């Protein structure tokens, strides 16, 4: 099955919006054993949409279109597709009721343009959108499938995940691959590959493919194999060996985030957490509060960016600040200990560092970071140097802090 993606939107072409939809669809198809052959990004223009779709249908079995399905006049994909497939737009009563319910639930008035969201091509199978007003559409012609989806990422993901992928794979009678992902933090791709070289060779010989998927201060490995019990068991056995060998780095046997893993551990141990952050500016707290239910364990954060705030709000010693500097073991440990007491928690993470691009020195260059964690038994700290990009330094410190707490909670430091 050959797949082509067509992404519609001027905002994508001018760089105003990053095309995360194409990335996500490509990844999701890949882990199901299907590769995307072509990808096109185009203007919201009828002639361009028509010509791009015509070309795509000559070289792909499936064309997935995202974008251009909003209620405004510049969203023309739906009407263009109706003309392309020589069908009429008719009001779909089920969709109309759902759109009406969407506005009623939010106590908003439904306008005529919103009613037109229920006007859909007669020949299309409608893919239900329970999160918004723009429905997905499924067309078939001459053995080819065209799927049109809203450009709003969470709506698009919902439609494909709820019905689209299953219907697509049934239509083309494709056997799904067995896919498994494990997640690491604090270990580089080349070092990890060296550490698991023997395991990887053994799996590859058995027909299991490994893909390394690096990102800022994190790394995933995806295992793909035909969906048979033998290879599933071999993959699980390999993961067990990797976890035993690298427990400080392997934080999830799936694609869970570090903040999810840490949250589950805090709930399991019935412990509470707070943060006192300097250069990370609340970044750790932000990661933690992305997780629903974090109020069970997360109590709050103090962002003590300036030294005077460290002194007045966290009671860091002015003498220590002058003698050792804000980016030091002595100061960061005081921040953690005093934050733990002030916010009355079991654990407190603190950070201080040189995020740059200015402010570094030979002794403490840009990327130089101290992290401390106050625990029920005491306090410990870690010094790291992370690159020279401000954004990457902060992100790396956030993830390293969370992984450090994970290791502490699991007694694997």
Image (cartoon, rainbow, N blue to C red):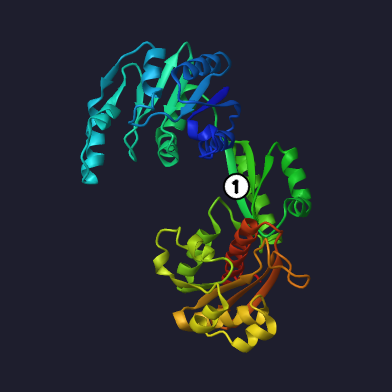
Disc 1 target residue: 181
Direction from residue 281 to residue 370 in the image, left or right: right
Direction from residue 99 to residue 410 in the image, left or right: right
SS state under label 1 = strand
For the image, the number of numbered tags is 1
Identify which residue is drawn at 25% across, 24% down: 92
| Viewer can see residue 375 | no
Determine whether 37 is above or below 155 in the image.
Answer: above
Question: Residue 128, image x and y in percent?
Answer: 34, 32
| Viewer can see residue 87 | yes
Direction from residue 308 to residue 109 in the image, left or right: left
Identify which residue is drawn at 35% across, 35% down: 129
Along the line of sight, which residue is nearer the eye, 231 or 81? 81
Direction from residue 46 to residue 205 in the image, left or right: right
Q: Mark 1 packing: few (<14 Cα in 10 Å), some, or many (20+)?
A: many
Determine whether 59 is above or below 32 in the image.
Answer: above
Question: Residue 151, image x and y in percent?
Answer: 44, 34
Question: Residue 260, image x and y in percent?
Answer: 50, 59
Q: Quadrant of the N terminus?
A: top right
Q: Quadrant of residue 375?
A: bottom right
Question: Residue 27, image x and y in percent?
Answer: 57, 37
Q: Quadrant of the C terminus?
A: bottom right
Determine whether 2 is above or below 99 in the image.
Answer: above
As drawn, which residue projects farthest toward the front? 358
Determine whether 320 is above or below 57 in the image.
Answer: below
Identify which residue is drawn at 21% across, 46% down: 107
Identify which residue is drawn at 68% across, 64% down: 358
């Amino acid at each position: 099955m050959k797949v082509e993606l067509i992404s519609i939107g001027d905002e994508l072409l001018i760089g105003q919006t990053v095309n995360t939809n194409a990335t996500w669809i490509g990844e999701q198809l890949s882990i199901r054993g299907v590769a995307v052959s072509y990808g096109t990004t185009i203007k919201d223009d009828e002639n361009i949409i028509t010509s791009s779709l015509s070309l795509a249908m000559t070289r792909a079995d499936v064309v997935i279109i995202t974008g251009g399905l909003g209620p405004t006049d510049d969203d023309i994909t739906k009407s263009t597709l109706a003309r392309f497939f020589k069908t009429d737009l008719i009001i779909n009563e089920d969709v109309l009721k759902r759109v009406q319910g969407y506005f009623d639930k939010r106590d908003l008035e439904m306008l005529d343009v919103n009613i037109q969201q229920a006007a859909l091509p007669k020949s299309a199978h409608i893919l239900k959108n329970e999160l918004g007003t723009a429905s997905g559409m499924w067309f078939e012609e001459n053995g080819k499938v065209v799927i049109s989806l809203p450009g709003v990422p969470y709506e698009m993901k919902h439609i494909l995940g709820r019905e689209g992928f299953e219907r697509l794979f049934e239509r083309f009678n494709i056997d799904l691959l067995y896919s498994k992902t494990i997640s690491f933090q604090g270990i580089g791709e080349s070092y990890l590959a060296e550490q698991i070289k023997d395991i990887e060779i053994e799996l590859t010989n058995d027909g299991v493919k490994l893909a390394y998927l690096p990102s800022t201060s994190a790394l995933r490995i995806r295992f793909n194999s035909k969906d048979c019990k033998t290879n599933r068991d071999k993959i699980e056995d390999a993961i067990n060996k990797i976890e035993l060998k690298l427990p400080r780095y392997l934080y999830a046997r799936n694609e869970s985030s570090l903040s999810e893993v840490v949250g589950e551990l805090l709930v399991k141990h019935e412990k509470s957490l707070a943060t006192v952050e300097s250069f990370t500016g609340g970044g750790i707290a932000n990661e933690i509060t992305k997780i629903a239910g974090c109020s069970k364990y997360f109590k709050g954060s103090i962002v003590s960016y300036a030294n005077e705030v460290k002194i007045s709000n966290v009671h860091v010693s002015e003498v220590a600040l002058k003698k050792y500097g804000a980016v030091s073991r002595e100061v960061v440990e005081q921040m953690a200990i005093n934050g733990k007491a002030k916010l009355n928690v079991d654990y407190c993470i603190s950070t201080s560092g040189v995020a740059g691009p200015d402010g570094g020195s030979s002794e403490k260059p840009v990327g130089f970071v101290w992290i401390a964690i106050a625990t029920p038994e005491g306090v410990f700290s870690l010094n790291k140097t992370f690159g020279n990009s401000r954004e990457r330094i902060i992100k790396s410190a956030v993830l390293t802090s969370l992984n450090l707490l994970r290791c502490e909670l699991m007694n694997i430091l």
